[in-house]
Structures are given as structure tokens and as C-alpha cells.
Amino acid sequence: MNQTLRGRRILVTRPAAQAGTLAQLITAEGGEPVLFPLLTIAPADDVQPLRQAIARLDDYSIAIFISPNALEFSLPIILAERPWPADLQAAAIGPSTAVQLAACGIGNVIVPAGRFDSEALLALPAFQAGCVAGKNVLILRGNGGREMLAETLIERGAQVDCVTCYQRSSPTDAAPLRSRLQSGQLDALTISSSEGLRNLLNLLDTDDCERLRMLPLFVPHQRIAEVAAERGLLRIVLTRPADAGIIEALCGHDWLGEVCN
């Protein structure tokens, strides 16, 4: 095998349970994945709001799964209590969530193409005011995050219920990462969420942030790239979506002039 990443140390920042595939792909190409999750994902402290939504699931016209985590921490509970309503339209921010929904027997999922974020979903015809006004919409999501999706749908006339079905927390100890940055033992980093990027920068002091800015940053979403640029990162590589897009970009990167320490 042509190991295009031989000798490269790549920071993998996905949540621990979701980092395995990308780590394996990097290893297969001769690289060294350096695991440092920037988000810890856990079930919501209170499952009662989800159970209340399940009890009135037939009242909703659209259910939006904001992420694969939203699906993982809600759909098994829903399907354990009742079948998915035939008239309930499912929507997803990204294609991986849509694939998982299809695997659970929920087809015809509304999902944007090209860019996978709330803005792209809201640009679809199905979410314009003429289609959502007067309808009940359920948003399944994690704690925190942006309110823009719910607020826009409300402005367009929808009745929106937001249910937190999982919670995210950030790491507090950056010592292993800082050690690698200070000793030059990282060649690139991958970031899969804007929140994770913010967590990373908040963990580091000014000197370490400056070291970070000199590394190529591979991100699979336009919004992450925009946040990275706003925060002063200099070498941003926008990849195709998901792990496949990240590893493709890593392997296709021009490493000429990149020195392995």
C-alpha cells in the first residue's frame, strides 16, 4: 500500500466513540492518529422531555435530527415505545444521519446537499414559510448550540419544540496536547465541529494558539472553516464531508515543505 501519511502525526478530535474510523484510516496510510476528543457526548440528564415528545409524536409534521448524536440518543427510545408515524416527515442536517434513519426504516428523509448545516436545511423548499407555517416541528438536539434553526422556523410560522436528548462537555486538561504542540510533535489537525474548535482554542494559551495556527487544519464543513478563519487560523483545508472526505484530503495534501520532527 502507498502509505501517503507515513510519519505524519494527525490530531483526531472527534468524540471518543466516533474517532475510531478516522484513526484507522490514518493508520492504514502510515500516519499516527493522536486522539484528543474535544467533546464528550453523554445522554441527557433528564429524559422526560423526550418521553413527552414521544407521547405526542403524532401531532408533529416534521422531526429534525440535528446530528448523528441526536439520532443515537433519541431514536432507539422512540422506537422502543412506538412505531415511527407514517405521516411524520424526518429531516437531517447531514447525509450520515439520513443513512442511519434509512437503516431504521425511516425513508424519504429531507437532507440538504452540498453544505450540511442549519442554513442549508432552512434554504430547502420544505422549510420555507409557505410549507411550515402552522405546522408542529420537533427538533432533536444536544445541549447548547445555536438557536438559529428554531428561531427561524418560528419566524416562518411553525410551532417548534426543541428536545435535548444528549449533552456535550469539553475537556479541561490540555496538558497532553500542549506538550505535543510545544515539542513539535503534530503535523496536522482535524476538526469536525465549530464547538470543538472553540473548545480547543479556549484550552490553549496565546503561545500554543500561535503554534496551532501554523499547522494545516482539515475541516469537513464550510461553517467550521469560517469559524477557523474568524479565529485567526491560517492554513484551513475544507474537505468533503465525513471521515472519507477528511482522509481523502489528508492523503491528497501537498506535504512538500512540511518537515516531520
Image (cartoon, grey):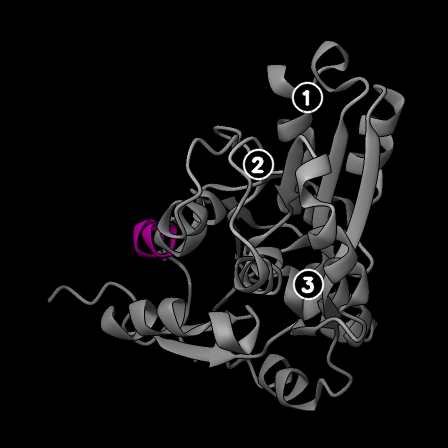
Residue range highlighted in magenta: 247-254
**Would residue 40 appear left or right of 257 to someone viewing this image?**
right
Which amino acid type is shown beneath numbered disc 3? Gly
79 inside magenta stretch: no
Mark 2 to mark 3 CA distance (whole Å): 24 Å
Residue 146 at x, y = what percent? 81, 46
Check disc 3 and report its element: helix, strand or loop.
helix
Mark 1 to mark 3 CA distance (whole Å): 28 Å
Q: Quadrant of the C terminus?
A: bottom left
- Residue 127: which numbered mark, if any? 1
- Residue 91: which numbered mark, if any? 2
From the image, give the main secondary structure of the stretch colored magenta: helix
**Would residue 166 appear left or right of 147 to someone viewing this image?**
left
Give the label, 1 or 3, closer to the camera.
1
Q: Residue at x 80, y 47 (%)?
A: 162
Q: Which residue is mark 3?
A: 196
First in sequence: mark 1 vs mark 2:
2
Q: Quadrant of residue 51?
A: bottom right
First in sequence: mark 2 vs mark 3:
2
Residue 173 at x, y = what percent? 74, 88
Q: In front: 129, or 260?
A: 129
Which amino acid type is shown beneath numbered disc 1? Phe
Q: Quadrant of the N terminus?
A: bottom left
251 inside magenta stretch: yes
Against 12, is 164 above or below?
A: above
Q: Circles 1 and 3: CB distance less than 8 Å?
A: no
Q: Residue at x 56, y 37 (%)?
A: 90
First in sequence: mark 1 vs mark 3:
1
Q: Residue at x 69, y 14 (%)?
A: 131
Check disc 2 and report its element: helix, strand or loop.
strand
Residue 167 at x, y = what percent? 74, 69
